[in-house]
């Protein structure tokens, strides 16, 4: 039995965007567009000064680089073989909407380079239709101009990524996840687990901590962990954190940071460890709370409330 091959409305479609950051409204536009074309080309527009300005105006915890934005698109559409992603360097062109002529010229150069002849441009910006038609001479298809289907914009996400978390694509979320280390002993040790439960997210455990603390407190001659074990423990922790970030809900919690680990090493072996020191300086936690830095003689509830307040402040 032969299967009828459905023909697309258009052969080649284009989409332009900054994807700063990539959200589900963009994905809706792209998936809807690709159902009307044989091949879809997405152009990720980059302009260093504009991108920096957008970041400065935003409440994003760190600036997404071109490589991040490219990788969000690549990851999201990794199984969509007729979606092609290109980087469009917009350097030196007046910012939208003042540079249409130069901008379209730059786009046309890139299209020629890749031998792309567009039949249609997809956008949700009704005000751009006239210019797209004029400069590219092809059809323009408007998708959900009023954002009925996915009521979100990248501006809103930049203003508050945590409030708009559900709109950020799964591929982009790890970039925004904040890492929190809550360090302490006894009942303080439960706090990162409690918070992970409250925030419906991941706790990254490290079963070696109890061991290490025993080695510090009991000064016997026999050591169970050698210097290399410490490096292995640190690397394992980096790996576990990275894995947790992949599926975390805004935050990940753990009970050790690398500064503490380097200090323990120092105490035990009475020397510095270059690997742990490098990790301590390069690995960024967004919040580290150490029991010893908090007011002493607090009740468990007071500790809980103090720490919770600090964590809440990360998501504002
Ligand atoms: N320099 C110029 O004069 C000029 C002119 C035209 C275009 N441009 C460039 O084109 C790019 C346009 O980027 P942008 O700001 O539109 O990017 P964007 O990343 O905000 O949006 C990308 C696309 O997704 C659509 N979209 C956004 N939210 C949506 C939602 N909720 N539902 C459905 N669709 C949604 C937008 O309409 C756009 O078509 C930029 O790189 C800009 O510099 C520049």
Image: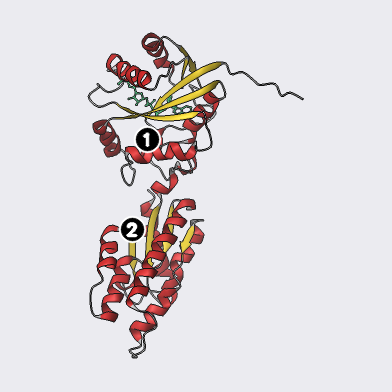
Q: How many marks?
A: 2
**Residue identified by numbered label 1:** 20
- Residue plotted at (45% across, 25% down): 41
Q: Give the image quadrant in which the ligand numbered 1 is located.
A: top left
Q: Relative to 305, does residue 227 appear above or below in the rendering?
A: below
Which image quadrant is residue 218 in? bottom left
Q: Can residue 148 be seen in this snapshot?
A: yes
**Residue identified by numbered label 2:** 285
Q: How far apart, in angstroms, are the residues tagged by discs 2 and 1?
A: 23 Å
**Can you give x and y, in whole percent of width and height, for residue 246 in the image?**
46, 51
**Can you give x and y, in whole percent of width and height, for residue 125 in the image?**
43, 20
Which sits earlier in the primary sequence, circle 2 or circle 1?
1
Q: Nearer the viewer, residue 39 or 192?
A: 39
- Residue plotted at (41% across, 10% down): 133
Q: Can residue 168 be seen in this snapshot?
A: no
- Residue plotted at (48% across, 59% down): 202
Q: Nearer the viewer, residue 209 or 299?
A: 209
Label 1 C-beta lies within 8 Å of the nearest ligand 1 atom: yes
Answer whether labels 2 and 1 touch (C-beta < 8 Å): no
Label 2 C-beta lies within 8 Å of the nearest ligand 1 atom: no
**Can you give x and y, in whole percent of width and height, for residue 62 in the image?**
31, 46
Report whether 6 appears left or right of 102.
right
């Amino acid at each position: 039995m032969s299967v009828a091959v459905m023909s697309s409305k258009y052969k080649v479609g284009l989409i332009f965007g900054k994807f700063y950051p990539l959200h589900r409204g963009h994905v809706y536009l792209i998936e809807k567009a690709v159902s009307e074309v044989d091949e879809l080309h997405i152009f990720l527009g980059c302009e260093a000064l504009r991108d920096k300005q957008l970041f400065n105006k935003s409440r994003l915890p760190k600036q997404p680089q071109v490589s991040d934005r490219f990788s969000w698109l690549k990851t999201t559409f990794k199984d969509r073989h007729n979606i092609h992603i290109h980087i469009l360097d917009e350097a030196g062109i007046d910012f939208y909407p003042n540079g249409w002529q130069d901008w379209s010229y730059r786009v046309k150069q890139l299209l020629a380079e890749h031998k792309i002849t567009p039949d249609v441009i997809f956008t949700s910006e009704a005000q751009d239709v006239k210019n797209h038609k004029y400069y590219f001479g092809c059809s323009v298809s408007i998708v959900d101009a009023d954002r009925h289907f996915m009521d979100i914009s990248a501006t809103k996400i930049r203003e508050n990524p945590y409030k708009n978390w559900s709109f950020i694509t799964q591929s982009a979320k790890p970039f925004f996840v904040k890492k929190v280390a809550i360090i302490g002993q006894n009942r303080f040790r439960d706090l990162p687990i409690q918070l992970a439960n409250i925030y419906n997210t991941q706790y990254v455990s490290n079963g070696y901590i109890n061991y290490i603390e025993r080695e510090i407190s009991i000064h016997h001659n026999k050591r169970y962990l050698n210097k290399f074990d410490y490096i292995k423990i640190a690397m394992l922790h980096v790996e576990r954190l990275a894995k947790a970030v992949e599926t975390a809900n805004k935050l990940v919690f753990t009970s050790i940071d690398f500064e503490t680990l380097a200090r323990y090493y120092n105490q035990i072996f009475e020397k510095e460890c270059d690997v742990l020191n490098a990790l301590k300086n390069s690995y960024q936690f967004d919040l580290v709370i150490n029991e010893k830095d908090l007011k002493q003689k607090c009740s468990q509830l007071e500790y809980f409330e103090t720490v919770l307040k600090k964590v809440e402040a990360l998501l504002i």
